[in-house]
């Protein structure tokens, strides 16, 4: 039986203060539509699960938005993984993820199966445009088309007023802002600064793949960013030189790219706000990180050193 578009919500649709799990897109769409009609605002936090403190930070940020109900989606999206990537072994921990959502008081959890979201496959998908082929996209062809396709679907299903994404995946954040603008999604995309371990390592679901020695090697990424940002007053060459010097001391870290770009990921400006981005492999694990850099201005510090 299909519930009408306007049927009142039951406690199995939405229970204030509890995390209600949905897998059916149409049903969740009806729940969020009804809540919005009642004057609530919806904040969406898309994730692939294996939740850590970075994800929790996004949920906490969402909860601080006034009058807002937080929807966390948990979906390992096959469309954004290449044929030789880690889709099959990507960490999945639904029970712990649900407990984290409850602790952080996210009231709706959307956890569809692949067949719930891609009912008839995925014949029509989005193209991420030229930026989708650069940086991460150069190493992971089709990745951002897959990301934007699932995020657009989530936007259409959930109808959020706010969608929160981490700066950890900086290119993803820039592309989602661009998609929202180019495709006229009526919502605010909110970027949240990267949460790090005390020693600087950016939290990532993929960190569980690292052995102890590999984790130590992985610190070279955030250390390189911090070293670059530290000398940002000297301009682009100084930043890249300092970052490369740190990486040279860790030959076991195989660099995919180290690039300085504008904050919108166009060419870096000579002076002012820029972004330093890095991707590298440590053993079989691919890690990415990035940091803000203020070019040509003295006394600059960076998140990456904290
Ligand atoms: P994922 O589950 O890896 O797809 O990540 C879901 C969301 O969490 C994305 O918006 C990520 O950018 C964000 N995220 C992942 N790691 C961190 C982190 N260390 N700090 C802040 N946000 C993060």
Image: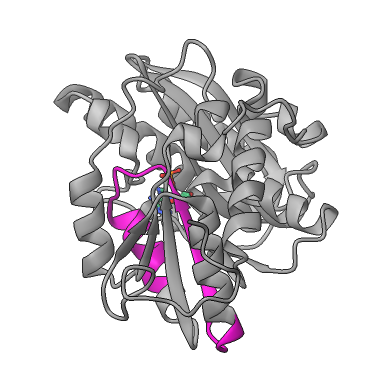
- Answer yes or no: is residue 83 visible: yes
- Please count the marks in the image: 0
For the C terminus, the image quarter is bottom left
- Give the residue furthest to the left: 212
Q: On screen, 126 above or below 178? A: above
Taking depth in this image into account, of 54 and 65 the one nearest to the observer is: 65
Examine the image and state in which quarter residue 150 appears: top right
Taking depth in this image into account, of 218 and 229 the one nearest to the observer is: 218
Which percent across, then down, holds residue 262? 73, 49
- Give the residue furthest to the front: 1
Q: On screen, 43 above or below 228? A: below
Which percent across, then down, holds residue 270? 79, 49
- Give the residue furthest to the top: 84
Left or right of 40, for residue 47: left
Which percent across, then down, holds residue 181? 80, 58
Q: Residue at x 73, y 44 (%)?
A: 265
Left or right of 197, for residue 220: right
User: Does 301 lie within the magenta span?
Assistant: no
Q: On screen, 103 above or below 224? A: below
How does the figure colour the protein chain or chains?
one colour
Left or right of 106, for residue 131: right
Q: Residue at x 82, y 53 (%)?
A: 183
Q: Residue at x 23, y 32 (%)?
A: 208
- Answer yes or no: is residue 300 visible: no
Residue segment shown in magenta: 37-61
User: Does 50 lie within the magenta span?
Assistant: yes
Taking depth in this image into account, of 119 and 78 the one nearest to the observer is: 119
Which percent across, then down, holds residue 95? 19, 48
Taking depth in this image into account, of 253 and 158 the one nearest to the observer is: 158
């Amino acid at each position: 039986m299909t519930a009408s578009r306007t049927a009142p919500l039951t406690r199995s649709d939405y229970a204030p203060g509890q995390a209600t799990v949905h897998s059916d897109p149409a049903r969740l769409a009806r729940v969020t539509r009804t809540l919005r009609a009642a004057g609530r605002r919806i904040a969406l936090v898309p994730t692939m699960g294996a939740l850590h403190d970075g994800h929790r930070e996004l949920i906490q940020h969402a909860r601080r938005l006034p009058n807002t109900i937080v929807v966390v989606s948990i979906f390992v999206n096959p469309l954004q993984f290449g044929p030789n990537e880690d889709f099959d072994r990507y960490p999945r921990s639904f029970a712990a993820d649900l407990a984290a959502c409850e602790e952080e008081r996210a009231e709706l959890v959307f956890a569809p199966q692949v067949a719930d979201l891609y009912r008839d496959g995925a014949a029509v998908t989005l193209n991420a445009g030229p930026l989708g082929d650069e940086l991460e996209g150069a190493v992971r062809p089709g990745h951002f088309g897959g990301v934007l396709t699932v995020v657009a679907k989530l936007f259409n299903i959930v109808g959020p007023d706010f969608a929160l994404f981490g700066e950890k995946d900086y290119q993803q954040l820039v592309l989602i802002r661009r998609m929202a603008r180019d495709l006229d999604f009526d919502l605010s995309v909110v970027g949240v600064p990267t949460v790090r371990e005390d020693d600087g390592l950016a939290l990532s679901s993929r960190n569980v793949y690292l052995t102890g020695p590999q984790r130590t090697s992985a610190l070279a990424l955030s250390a390189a960013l911090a070293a670059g940002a530290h000398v940002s007053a000297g301009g682009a060459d100084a930043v890249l030189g300092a970052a490369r010097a740190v990486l040279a001391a860790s030959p076991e870290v195989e660099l995919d790219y180290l690039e300085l770009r504008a904050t919108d990921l166009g060419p870096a400006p000579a002076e002012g706000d820029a972004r330093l981005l890095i991707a590298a492999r440590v053993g079989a694990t691919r890690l990415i990180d990035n940091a803000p850099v203020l070019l040509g201005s003295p006394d600059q510090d960076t998140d990456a050193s904290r």
